[in-house]
Image: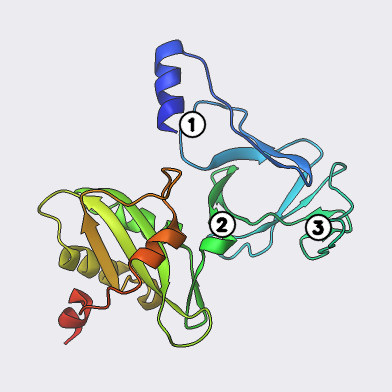
Amino acid sequence: SAVAKSFFEKFRQPIHSFYGASECGGICYDRCGTKFEDGLVGQPIQGVDVELIDPKETASQVRVRGAAVSDGYFPEPDEQKLGNGVFVPDDLLARHDSALKIVGRVSDVINVAGKKVNPAEVEAHLLRFKGVRQAVVFGRPTGAGLRNEEVAACVLAAPDVTETDLLRFCRTTLSGWQVPKRIFVMETIPTNERGKISRRELARQFSERHDSSPLRTLAS
């Protein structure tokens, strides 16, 4: 979004977002082209129906219906994902005014004792704290059963921002299962070999840092 905004400010030409997949062709299109927000994909394309599977949730997968939806996968069909005229992408979307916005991926969702945490929601909350420039939230295994995780985060922040400050901020406004157990305040956030931030790689790098959390100190 920052690049698109800079381009618009320099050349006064809109940048339109297009959301689609090989399984179904086009899904959404941003007709405006002057709203510079990460993940904003606009409205469904004419002739395409986009249905939120869990409309009461803040983020949901969608069912896409349209003439271009493929018949299925071959040679390994998966009718829950693609079949009977319906395609279900792995993206998580949310309503944003009259448009739709991609806010995450199903694979990013953190399983906290059966509760589902969307990292994007916690990241957005952390970014509201004065001095925080970037936040990446991820799940790391707790050893308490298959796919049971705890929430952790890496942030870039001003020198006076501490982990205790951030944990207290999260604790007063987020639901208990959304509150990170650890927040690592860093000078740089590690990237993978392609130069991209990977939640999975962060979970691996920080999986062994089980020192006492300031959150536990606050709770005592």
Q: Distance between the residues labelled 1 and 2?
A: 22 Å
- In this rendering, the answer to whether 176 lies above or below 16 is below
Of circles 1 and 2, the one toward us is: 2
Closer to the camera, 56 or 195? 195
Name the residue: 86% across, 58% down: 83
Residue bearing mark 1? 35
* Mark 1 closeness class: few <14, some 14–19, many ≥20 residues within 10 Å: some
Question: Dot 1 lies on which element?
Answer: loop
Residue 138 falls left or right of residue 94: left
Q: In which quarter of the image is residue 198?
A: bottom left
Name the residue: 88% across, 42% down: 67
Which x, y percent locates residue 45? 73, 36
* Mark 3 closeness class: few <14, some 14–19, many ≥20 residues within 10 Å: many
- The type of colouring in the image is rainbow
* Mark 2 closeness class: few <14, some 14–19, many ≥20 residues within 10 Å: some
For marks 1 and 2, the one nearer the N-term is 1
Residue bearing mark 3? 82
The three-letter amino acid code for the residue at tag 2 is Arg
Question: Dot 3 lies on which element?
Answer: strand
For marks 3 and 1, the one nearer the N-term is 1
- In this rendering, the answer to whether 118 lies above or below 41 is below
Q: Do the residues labelled 3 and 1 touch (CB within 8 Å)?
A: no
Residue 158 falls left or right of residue 28: left
Name the residue: 89% across, 58% down: 84
Name the residue: 81% across, 57% down: 82
Of circles 3 and 1, the one toward us is: 3
Which x, y percent locates residue 202? 38, 61
Residue 194 falls left or right of residue 91: left
The three-letter amino acid code for the residue at tag 3 is Leu
Residue bearing mark 2? 105
